[in-house]
Image (cartoon, rainbow, N blue to C red):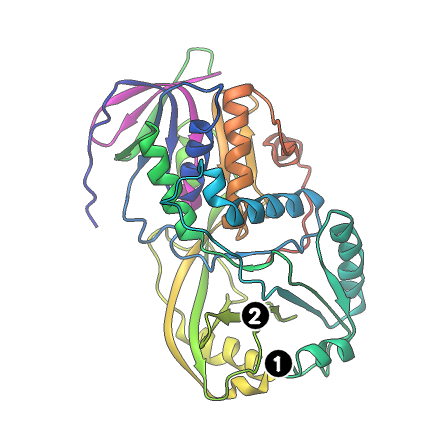
Amino acid sequence: MVLKTQAPKQSSYDVVIVGGAIFGSSAAWFLSDDKDFDGSVLIIERDPSYEFASTSRTNSCMRQQFTAEINVKCSQFAADFVKNLRQYMGNDERVPELEIQNFGYMYLADNEEFADVLIESQAMQVAAGAGTRVLTPEQIKQEYPFYNLDDIILGSINTVDEGYWDGITVFDWWRKSARERGIEYCQNEVVAMTKSANGERVESVTLKSGEIISCGQVVNASGPRAVLTSRMAGIEIPVEPRKRFTWIFQAEQPLDRPLPLTIDPSGVHVRQEGTEYYLAGGHADYDPAPDYDDFEMDHDLWQDHIWPVMASRIPQFEAIKVTNEWAGHYAYNTFDHNAILGPHDEVKNFIFLNGFSGHGLQQSPAMGRGIAEIIAHGEYRTLDLSDFGYDRIVKNKEFIEKAVI
């Protein structure tokens, strides 16, 4: 695919954001919303159709069932932002009122070790304000009689601010509002960066169309291509694409109540999709980094693994019809499966917004706001997101989050 390019309007910007999908747009919008920031911002996006962006191929879900408290708090802010989008957008009457479809997540444990994790996590989540409940198989069966629970010893579910949300509408309004506030979007591609003589700053970026753009700060919001961007600044980060598959289907015998996003012990997940359809997702056991342009479906995976697991867990899904399917890419942090956020320790004006490993969409409000705070104020002023800093990569100190799907 040959992508067009356009030249930026200026030759110098205070902030250059590489990548205009949901994270680049979130950071830009929150900068535009900060009364103390009056700098110029350029977003460089190689494909403004976003056809293959992770943002466009997400399943757009939100949960508070994490094992790390800061991840819970990021999702809680996302829930507040989504439900009050119009208010956050200055009560602009053009902005739609959004809701979260609170069918919740149902984690199922088939062993004592994971059951203990669910119990421990539920206590932390409740203390943080979440509505998570731990259920015995009998309690699960009473509320959701369609499950086969012969091998299950415990489950947890939260139906408060947990389920599906309209991420694309939020993304669209971040872009629209950011543009109206003076944020510049440019269809182009960064192909090189020039650093200062001491190596402590990126002084300019070179575009595919030939322009050299001076910059005060650079934000890497390149999704699965993050390492390609960081290498231009001489930085290696453990982020690579991982292919994830989604199927939409109808059931010959639909369930009589909404289906929570059910995480089977096998790793297969399935949930309600609207009123008539269901959505299933998963990946193969062999899970290498694909080519950046590889979005080919794996039909054997569906036939041999995803469907059999679903039909075993929910017998009414033995007779179903697939109506749509697609593959997307996670921006996968191979180090510890969590975000890499904030400035580099040596190239101090190179800022990471990378590696969300599948829970990025729901973290985009909190993480975009956090990056805007770092740029405008030099510190986090709302949620302390320092646990996601790049220094942990240098120190080889993992940030532990056990609930990664």
Element class at badge 1: helix
Q: How far apart are marks 1 and 2 (CA)?
A: 10 Å
Q: Which mark is residue 313?
A: 1
- Taking the spot 54% from the left edge, 38% from the top edge, the residue there is 367
Q: Is residue 351 visible?
A: yes
State yes or no: discs 1 and 2 in contact (Cβ < 8 Å). yes
- Labels 1 and 2: the sequence-earlier one: 2
- Taking the spot 72% from the left edge, 83% from the top edge, the residue there is 150
Q: Position of residue 309 (x, y in %)?
A: 57, 79
Q: Which amino acid does label 2 sit on?
A: Val
Q: Residue 268 carries which label?
A: 2
Observer-nearest of 391 and 365: 365
Q: Where is residue 192 in the image (x, y as percent from the top left)?
A: 32, 27
Question: Looking at the picture, does residue 242 appear above or below residue 375?
Answer: below
Give the magenta-colored segment's residue range: 200-225
Q: What residue type is labelled 1?
A: Arg
Horizontal side, residue 66 vs residue 58: left or right: right
Could you classify mark 2 by the number of other residues whose Cα lies within 10 Å: few (under 14), some (14-19), or many (20 or more)? Answer: some
